[in-house]
Image (cartoon, coloured by chain):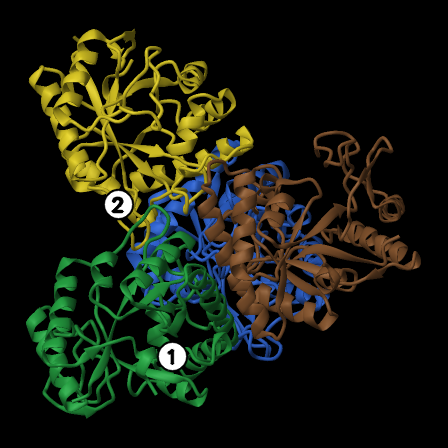
Chain colours: A blue, B yellow, C brown, D green
Amino acid sequence: MQTKVDLNADLGEGFGAWTMGEDEAMLAVVSSANVACGFHAGDPLVMWRTCELAKAHGVAVGAHPSFLDLWGFGRRPIQGERPEDIMRHCVYQIGALQAVAAAVGHRVTHVKPHGSLGNMAAEDDGLAMAVAEATSLCGRDLVLVAMPGSALERAGERKGLRVAREVFADRAYDDRGMLVSRKLPGAVLHDAEEAARRILRMLEDQAITSQSGNKVPARIDTICVHGDNPAAVAMARAVRSAIERAGVTIRPFHEWLA
Amino acid sequence: MQTKVDLNADLGEGFGAWTMGEDEAMLAVVSSANVACGFHAGDPLVMWRTCELAKAHGVAVGAHPSFLDLWGFGRRPIQGERPEDIMRHCVYQIGALQAVAAAVGHRVTHVKPHGSLGNMAAEDDGLAMAVAEATSLCGRDLVLVAMPGSALERAGERKGLRVAREVFADRAYDDRGMLVSRKLPGAVLHDAEEAARRILRMLEDQAITSQSGNKVPARIDTICVHGDNPAAVAMARAVRSAIERAGVTIRPFHEWLA
Amino acid sequence: MQTKVDLNADLGEGFGAWTMGEDEAMLAVVSSANVACGFHAGDPLVMWRTCELAKAHGVAVGAHPSFLDLWGFGRRPIQGERPEDIMRHCVYQIGALQAVAAAVGHRVTHVKPHGSLGNMAAEDDGLAMAVAEATSLCGRDLVLVAMPGSALERAGERKGLRVAREVFADRAYDDRGMLVSRKLPGAVLHDAEEAARRILRMLEDQAITSQSGNKVPARIDTICVHGDNPAAVAMARAVRSAIERAGVTIRPFHEWLA
Amino acid sequence: MQTKVDLNADLGEGFGAWTMGEDEAMLAVVSSANVACGFHAGDPLVMWRTCELAKAHGVAVGAHPSFLDLWGFGRRPIQGERPEDIMRHCVYQIGALQAVAAAVGHRVTHVKPHGSLGNMAAEDDGLAMAVAEATSLCGRDLVLVAMPGSALERAGERKGLRVAREVFADRAYDDRGMLVSRKLPGAVLHDAEEAARRILRMLEDQAITSQSGNKVPARIDTICVHGDNPAAVAMARAVRSAIERAGVTIRPFHEWLA
């Protein structure tokens, strides 16, 4: 079995007077935080505090750029955006976070596109290259987080970036190793212990385990967990415990990824 | 008379489908551009294009951070903002522009606060230090643009930043060397040739010339001109011509400021 | 003692993916809801749901217009807004809520300015008249909610509007019957039973009771309670219980205010 | 030939400090104005001024609701919006404009969806019904503007609304009477006189004339013209002149539409 893995979560998703998620609790669980950069959530104060807390917890921070869509929380699929425009939107967001992180003595070490941009960049080569190019422009050593087999993974490799392959602790996979649509039954796992067992099996097998038990070989560098509510935090903790009990070290991927 | 001076203007103030000002014309006139960073105007596409054009014209770019107030164009005086919050807002904006500028092969070399933030930071020591600290955090070599005698000038000096002293080509000054309120008659100059002559006199005297003819000694590193409309562009051109005819070289202050 | 009083709270303060406050719990406590209209919080979906729920609970709805300041949640004191502009901003917000309320079979029966606009309209005659005029333009029968002795109360009377006099269940008053600044000790009451007893005394005395025990005669038509957190909800329930035990009927002021 | 027709244009598309289009010029040309309601453009001040000017020119005003997308000017195709949500967004926007129009002594008499919402509601029955239902909720006598043969036309009829059939003065049509995609050559007409002649022919034939000369019978109640730039204004004037010379009266459709 592999000796190291990363645990990541989306954090810093408040805005102004609004808060979201259990950030403090999650910072004790994950090794990497994907920090909202103001386009779907996050503002300079939230970003600052999140970077400070991440640094204090030894958690790596990454930019979590999004379509410009505050009301829709970056979840609305916006068609027809030109890749060069999205690239510029991502450069802006990554740069803003880089400055904030540097100001608190931390630094941005990865990029993971958020919501609809993430979903679309997993399938659309143009958008995937836009995200990869923005990442590369902001730092040749930034790690791009992508699903194994996705357009984004290919784009990151083509740009010569280090790519961290990600699986989701709470999402079911089909026999090709792709996410089962949320509209289908069983797409989301709710049992923390089951999720922990499944992730451990994936790490042992170096393969994505599908709903039907199929194994799709895949390098697994980071596991996405959520902190939206107490149940999600409990699942994240269960996943972490299981991994640690199995003797796998949880560390930010930017430290060990080749 | 001094041998070098800078000419600056606020550019890149469009947003989405909206445009503002005569940016292309102004880039042929000024040596430094203050680029809106998305809080009062500007978006990643406008910023990108402005940085590209500035680079092509050999014009230096600076960040033009603002209160977060798109509808009010950063002109609404917002009371009670905590200096540490404004500092974080400025770090975000400067960092975003730094990434965009770097992506097009240019770089940010100065910071000048916009609108109400600029007005308030000229008088309020807390806000002035917030802007100076944000500038320093984003780059020890960034030049801070401030009015002679302002709180911002003092804050920049206290932070050890290079400070470029600025006069306005189209604004009247009182006998203390301070701007005459826009509410008073004669506060804004409309005659291009008169403005050009007045600026030349200031450069010769190394002093701000007041409405009444008083001279307040002041170093003048940069002259602010506007490009809001054709008449403003004409005044900017007249100022440039007069300066050049007098044998003063117009170059970005970051190149020659001690 | 008076036979009727209203209990009001600010509701519908979510935006997009963000929620705020315990709206469902509060709708079982209050008789009037002040609904955010999109400028500091609220969006068409939140407003729709809030109006539907209010109707189902027999709770009256009012518009809660604000300065245009989503990030600042309408709490930033914005200086220099022209009263005629604020009047137009309020007309827009009230009209939007009127249409939403009508669409769900409910209707807007009052207006109460939010946050900084509310604070400033309590003292500034120009802003107070702006709010009162907007209210009048949107409906001659709309009730304006104002603090006894405020500029807003006077403006409402001058416009010929019905004015509902409001006291706050959790705020201390000074000997002139004005709110004690939040910056001073004891400005906010935290003990639910104490708050309930104090409000009851005010209703009995038809007077605002100050911190020092002074009584400032004032008509009390509505009592503002909060639902930001479980403790606030508990206080709101305690106030309601105390009032009901005293035999005072809790009904929306628009039903009984002369 | 028909005796009456309406000329409409999108107006009030500024926002804050930004202006757009030649509104004053266009108000002397059109009989109906589609007024932006704040979601893609427009703000309460712009809406107020536009309604005042429209009233002064005897021009009818209609709401021009959009997806919530200020940066994208409502032109970004946002997928997956639930019809019931879009219905609520439209109710909010129509209601806001109704209040503003009433406040200046005018009134909203029609609704025409903007940009991507308009394009998508022309083809998608769910979105079309959302717009029609919002219109109906805001006023049973509001006229819905729709292209002949569109989903929106059908939805308006199904809701029992009066529907104004619209053709575009500057857009080419295919042999089914549908708009030629802007991506294809010849999709947009630039010659003012040619556009005027073509529109006159359509009014004479009561049919849409395609690029190839095919005639698709269609009632034509209103003709959309643009005011984005001086050339567009010139075309609008040419269209108006040609119609008047032909003896057709230009009046707002809400006055004469059955």
- Between marks 1 and 2 in the image, the one whose residue lies nearer the viewer: 1
* Spot occupied by residue C49 in the image (x, y as percentages of width and height): 62, 68
Residue at the spot x=39%, y=81% of the render?
A: D124
- What amino acid is at disc 1? Val
Q: Which mark is residue B157?
A: none
Kind of element beneath mark 2: loop
- What amino acid is at disc 2? Met
Pointer 2 indicates a residue of which chain? Answer: B
Residue count near mark 1 (Cα–Cα under 10 Å), binned few <14, some 14–19, many ≥20: many
Say which quadrant the N terminus of chain D sits in: bottom left
Q: Which mark is residue D143?
A: 1
Residue count near mark 2 (Cα–Cα under 10 Å), binned few <14, some 14–19, many ≥20: some
Q: Which mark is residue B20?
A: 2
Q: In the image, is residue A212 above or below residue B119?
A: below
Say which quadrant the C terminus of chain D sits in: bottom left
* Spot occupied by residue A3 in the image (x, y as percentages of width and height): 59, 52
Image quadrant in which you'd find residue D125? bottom left
Q: Is residue B112 visible?
A: yes
Kind of element beneath mark 1: strand
* Spot occupied by residue C136 in the image (x, y as percentages of width and height): 55, 56
Pointer 1 indicates a residue of which chain? Answer: D
Q: How many marks?
A: 2
Same chain for labels 1 and 2? Say yes or no: no
Q: Viewer-proximal residue, C51 or A209?
A: C51
How far apart are the alpha carbons under marks 1 and 2?
A: 35 Å
